[in-house]
Amino acid sequence: MPAWLCILFPNISHAWKPARGNIISICENWGYECLLIERGQESFDLEKIIHSVNQRLSNHPTEKTIFISSSFGDIVARELLKKNTIRAHISICGVSDSKEISLMSKILLWVAKKIRPYCYRRKRLRHKIATMFNRKRTPGVSIESIKMNTKCAERWLSKGLSERASFLLQYKEPTLPIKTPAYILYSEDDNNFKNPKHNANRIAHYYEKSFVITLGKAGHSSFVEMPQSYEETISNILHNIW
């Protein structure tokens, strides 16, 4: 059996395997080796990340490679897809353009930029900000899931978050269509965007071929808010790609 590869691009404040929900196990069940992109806690270097992934793709070519990106990770994935055509890109609550980000999220990003000298040395403040980044929950979400997701955000509230926030606030949409087929997943109550569906449709226009799929009445962290629907959707897409 060929060594198929799934490359995971995390969001702005979560880069820890548990924060991907059960997505790694799902991909492995379909025969994919999963690689979570390391971005460093002290800085954000987009060119270094791109070089590292391109090197991995060149040194270990596979019959079937897919990208799965969440939120901020969409930007990194699209930068790579400008010069690489792979089997498919699964975009989960991705960022299209800074203009689509809601006012509250822009405030949080601004806070992430400005409190850098104070936040990362104070555990209580890190917890408070991580809770803000994980705001709004769907009723019925387990306490354990909320704690895990917040803990993951705390872990990555590092100096590099300031640089990622600055990059995101200045980000502009790509100008050339991407050849890789894309599955654009969005949550209907995702308050990180002014209009989640409009944001998803805007991402879809970046690709020559795309499919827009709703994850239902969830917020930005659909993998903890509606895990069954989230995991079924990912599995169905992988079945379609297969």
Image (cartoon, helix red, strand yellow):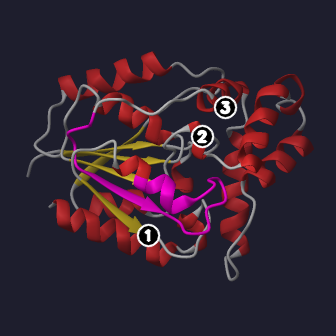
Query: Nearer the viewer's eye, disc 1 or disc 2?
Result: 2
Nearer the observer, 80 or 127: 80
**Is residue 131 within the magenta segment?**
no
Q: Residue at x 10, y 47 (%)?
A: 2
Numbered badge on residue 45: none
The type of residue carrying mark 1 is Thr
Determine if residue 93 is in view.
no
Marker disc for residue 214: 1
Secondary structure state at the residue bearing disc 2: helix
How would you rate the neighbour count of disc 2 (Cα within 10 Å): few for under 14, some for 14-19, many for 20 or more? Answer: some
Q: Residue at x 51, y 43 (%)?
A: 10
The stretch in magenta equals: 177-201
Which label's residue is closer to the chain start, 1 or 3?
3
Q: CA distance from mark 1 to mark 2?
A: 21 Å
Residue at disc 3, secondary structure = helix
Q: Secondary structure at mark 1?
A: strand
Rate crowding at label 1 as few (under 14), some (14 to 19) or many (20 or more) other CA atoms within 10 Å.
Answer: some
- Which residue type carries mark 3? Ala
Residue 4 shows in the view? yes
State the residue position of label 3. Answer: 165
- Where does label 2 land, which residue? 99
Question: In the orientation shown, which residue stands out farthest toward the bottom?
Answer: 140
Q: Position of residue 108 (x, y in %)?
A: 77, 42
**Which of the 4 quarters of the picture holds residue 149?**
bottom right
